[in-house]
Amino acid sequence: MKHLLSLEHLSAADMHAILKRVSAFKSRRADHARPLSGQTWAMIFSKSSTRTRVSFEVGIHELGGRPLFLNAGDIQLGRGEPIRDTARVLGRMVHGAVIRTYAQADVDEFARFSGIPTVNALTDEEHPCQILTDIYTFEERRGPITGKVVTFVGDGACNVPASWIWAAAKLGFELRIAAPPAYQPPAELLARAGGRVVCEADPLKAAAGADLLYTDVWVSMGREAEAEARLRELGAYQINAAVVQAAKPGALVMHCLPAYRGKEIDEATFEAHADTIFTQAENRLHVQKGILDWLVSV
């Protein structure tokens, strides 16, 4: 039984196997294979979403399946039913599950008790589907990411940079994280992952010669009470003209969206790189189809 629960537990070979599928799904959207034909996949979302929800619903449909969207507040899970009981019920009724929630432990437990393929569509610890999409988008435009330099600017202690850390360790590229000391990833995570990961307090130094500049919101879902402090402490960690100038000429700029212009990225830089950013968003659909196809393949 295959799952996509984290990049920590996904091998480099499996990452390549997923990414290898994507171009065919993107180029032949109208007439590709339908590996989910006759299947129903539950989508259990405790966190709000635009790109993740739409891309998975459309992707499941285009692969021949039926998406069943379940807001956690509308099912018994939202009234305190243990995740393992929800998993054992749904595992007898549907063919797979996509879960977007807070605790990584909930996704892991669902996979263990449901007996069906399970996808982590975001937790507080990781965002594996997003980073696989980002890697595909980079390679679509610039070739293999192995040996390249990726610079993340902003809150380096959240789920997106965590998944970038695992990807760097497994795919052989250098990851630089530009963040204040209090927003750098835990030392335990860095030691466990290995790979070439550098934490740097100076965003210009971290951006020097980078092939890809990347940022995310400063205030993630569930961190709203910290908004005032985060805006103050992360104010200098913005992708702007100076940071782009420090990077390699022609460096890509990405943002996993939603973007708050004037905070983690300025308006002019966002618009100058909008084609890349919205191609990145579009590619969530195609990469997630690759993930689903990989999950059900023998």
Image (cartoon, rainbow, N blue to C red):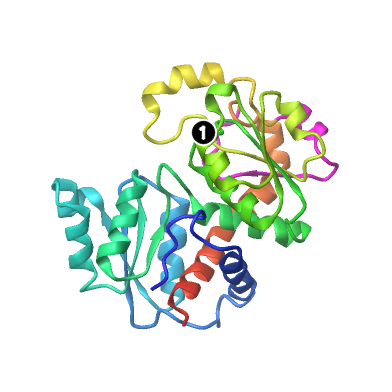
Q: Position of residue 180 (x, y in %)?
A: 60, 22
Measuring from the top left, give residue 115's x and y in whole percent.
29, 70
Residue 65, position as x, y percentages in the image: 38, 76
Quarter occupied by the N terminus:
bottom left
Q: Is residue 219 left or right of residue 95?
A: right
In the rendered view, would you say 200 is above or below 120?
above
Q: Is residue 270 above or below residue 129?
A: above
So how many labels did they put on this image?
Answer: 1
- Report the residue at 50% width, 67% height from top: 291
The residue depicted at 21 percent of the width and 58 percent of the height is: 84
Most foreground residue, 48 or 18: 18
Residue at screen point 29% across, 56% down? 109
Residue 161 visible? The answer is no
Residue 233, x across and y down, in percent? 55, 18
Identify the residue position indicated by label 1 in the image.
186
Mark 1, other Cα within 10 Å: few <14 / some 14–19 / many ≥20: few
Question: What residue is at 44 percent from the left and 22 percent from the top?
Answer: 227
Residue 245 drawn in magenta: yes
In this picture, which residue range is highlighted in magenta?
240-261
Q: Is residue 259 magenta?
A: yes
Is residue 291 shown left or right of residue 202? left
